[in-house]
Amino acid sequence: MATYKEIQTDIRQRHNRTVKTCWIAHVKELNGLELRQAPNRMSPTVRQVPCPPEFRPLIEDSMRRLGMLQ
């Protein structure tokens, strides 16, 4: 499984865009992938910064390229 840093680097190289790790976590959650609870997360049920809709396809494409999604 790819790391968040690998996903960020892939998106930066291919699309010249920067994504936040919380956006990657949100996309992982939306696709049913396993997440760990971050120690600094305020609420386990509420996302403070959800992934913007225009970044979701970029993140999912990168995750497919790196073998996390089919």
Image (tube, helix red, strand yellow):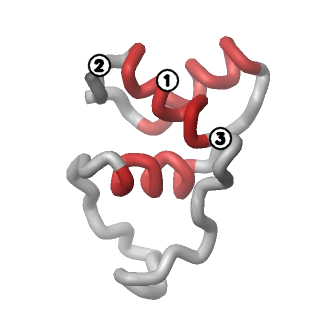
In this view, the residue farthest toward the left is 34
Secondary structure of the residue carrying numbered label 2 = loop
Earlier in the chain: of badge 1 and badge 3, it is 3
Q: Say which of marks 3 and 2 sits in front.
A: 3
Question: Residue 60 vs residue 66: left or right?
Answer: right
Q: Do the residues labelled 1 and 3 touch (CB within 8 Å)?
A: no
Q: Residue 6: tell me if it is visible.
A: no
- Which of the pair 40/50 is nearer the observer? 50
Residue where numbered disc 3 is placed: 55
As measured in the structure, the alpha-carbon distance from the residue carrying label 2 to the one carrying label 1 is 10 Å
Question: Residue 9 vs residue 43: left or right?
Answer: right
Question: Residue 63 vs residue 16: left or right?
Answer: left
Residue where numbered disc 1 is placed: 61
Earlier in the chain: of badge 3 and badge 2, it is 3
Check the image and report above or below for 15 versus 47: above
Earlier in the chain: of badge 2 and badge 1, it is 1
x 27%, y 56%: residue: 35
Residue 62, how many percent across, how many down? 49, 23
In this view, the residue farthest toward the bottom is 43
Q: Which amino acid does label 1 sit on?
A: Asp
As measured in the structure, the alpha-carbon distance from the residue carrying label 1 to the one carrying label 3 is 10 Å
Residue where numbered disc 2 is placed: 67
Secondary structure of the residue carrying numbered label 3 = loop
- Which of the pair 62/39 is nearer the observer? 62
Q: In which quarter of the image is the N terminus?
A: top left
Residue 51, how many percent across, how many down? 60, 55
x 32%, y 46%: residue: 31
x 49%, y 23%: residue: 61
Check the image and report above or below for 2 versus 29: above
Q: Residues within 10 Å of mark 1 (few under 14, many from 20)?
A: some
As measured in the structure, the alpha-carbon distance from the residue carrying label 3 to the one carrying label 2 is 18 Å
